[in-house]
Amino acid sequence: MAKPAQRALAQAGFFRLEQLAKVSEAELLKLHGMGPKTMGQLRAALAEKGLNFAE
């Protein structure tokens, strides 16, 4: 994952993958540094753990 996306997640208080399952993709896309590629990576990582973004 790109450094800007990592910084955006950290600044928003997201440090664990499980935390991302509590927010929607739309909310994450509002963060500076989050784009389609990063969202795809996060979606795949969540799926590996049997999780999804919130609706």
Image (cartoon, rainbow, N blue to C red):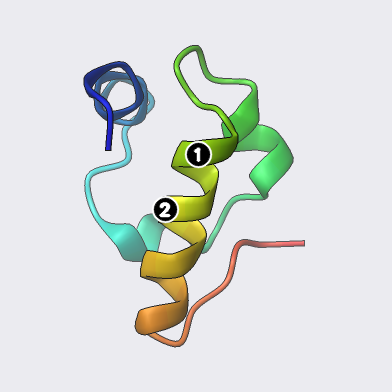
Image x and y of residue 52, in percent: 57, 72
Image x and y of residue 17, in percent: 31, 60
User: Distance between the Cα atoms at labels 2 and 1?
Assistant: 6 Å
Decide: few, some or many residues near mark 2? Use Cα within 10 Å; few <14, some 14-19, many ≥20.
Answer: few
Q: Please say if the residues under marks 2 and 1 sit with CB atoms less than 8 Å apart.
A: yes
Q: Note whether 21 is above or below 16 in the view shown.
A: below
* Rendered image quadrant of residue 13: top left
Residue where numbered disc 1 is placed: 37
Image x and y of residue 34, in percent: 50, 26
Q: Secondary structure at mark 2?
A: helix
- Residue type, label 2: Gln
Residue ranking furthest to the front: 37
Front residue of this view, candidates 18 and 39? 39
Front residue of this view, candidates 10 and 44? 44
For the point 35% across and 66% down, the residue is 18
Residue where numbered disc 2 is placed: 41
Q: Secondary structure at mark 1?
A: helix
* Left or right of 4, for residue 46: right
* Left or right of 36, for residue 8: left
